[in-house]
Image (tube, helix red, strand yellow):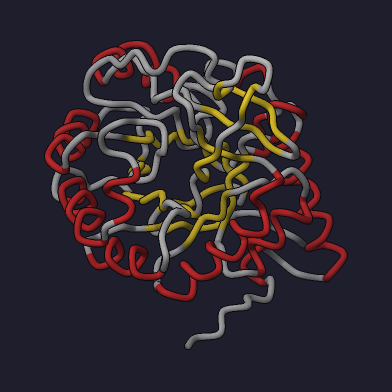
Amino acid sequence: MTGMAVTIGDLKLRGPVLAASGTFGYGTEVPLLERRALGAMVSKGIFLRPRRGTAPPRIVETPSGMLNAIGLQGPGADALIRDYAPLWADWDFPVLVNINGESASEYGELAARLDGVPGISGFEINISCPNVEQGGLYFGNDPRAAAAVTEAVRKRTTLPVWVKLTPMVSDIGVIARAVESAGADALCAINTLVGMSIDLNAGRPRLSFRTGGLSGPAIRPLAVYLAHQAARAVNIPVIGIGGIARAEDALEFLVAGCAAVQVGTATFVNPRAIADVHDGIAAYLKAKGLGSPADLPRHLPKD
């Protein structure tokens, strides 16, 4: 009999397919979806205080992908605790909060503010957003800064701490090892890549922020490679992200060494994408006579 449960650190999930941050907002639409397939949800990114984000236009469709420059618009910690966490407390799957800051201490302060709030099951530290002037890529590019942010959060919570890595580095393994040493329970690889699209009639970028984060199937081969490199570098679980639209896409990440996957941009095109990916993985495991995702072969040769 095939089971779909996976374990990420101390967090047990009923399935290996998670909703990626930024594509489900704070989950208010989740009750309308086929939630049985959701292993967990990662909320939209949030700062300690309310944030307006960037001016429109903020989303542009590209070949096999999408550029976004939302700028981490959000209501701040107090509104999240008041308006959203009570909803999550009644759900039958865990919700992790994607947290952001302009300094390591601000990340830590935000984690402390949210720690112990019913409905919040853990944190995904965003050290890799390309769409903010401060924070974002600065922390994700520097192993010392990445470790400092991770340690600041680790010290202020006993909840699971995942770190979302940027692809915009020369060696993702260096960053992965740094945040593992600083206390991360798991890694999420990868965030979007920086991209740009030009409106030739207007003679200027299509996004008001000029550049944006590229997601969707266009980045999947690179995402599989970088998630694989991260998984080879550490002993903690890696959650694969990047252009997953079908079960076959997710299975590539799992065989490359990931313990689970997140699906994001695909849900803009297919609201059933998470259920389709989940059911496709289950069918593949059954066809191969495998009992669970953990029984999949893992391609993790060490250097």
Q: Quadrant of residue 181?
A: bottom left
**Picture coordinates of residue 253, whole percent (x, y):** 64, 61
Q: Is residue 69 above or below residue 75?
A: below
Give the residue at x 62% y 61%: 224
Q: Is residue 296 above or below residue 81?
A: below
Q: Left or right of 47: which side holds 62?
A: right
Give the residue at x 39% y 30%: 45
- Name the foreground residue: 11 vs 68: 68
Q: Left or right of 88: which side holds 257?
A: right
- Name the foreground residue: 221 vs 48: 221
Q: Quadrant of residue 52?
A: top left
Give the residue at x 57% y 49%: 241
Q: Quadrant of residue 170?
A: bottom left
Q: Quadrant of the N terminus?
A: bottom right
Give the residue at x 41% y 68%: 171
Q: Left or right of 26: which side holds 256?
A: right
Q: Left or right of 22: which side holds 249?
A: right
**Picture coordinates of residue 38, whole percent (x, y):** 61, 38
Q: Is residue 276 above or below residue 281?
A: above
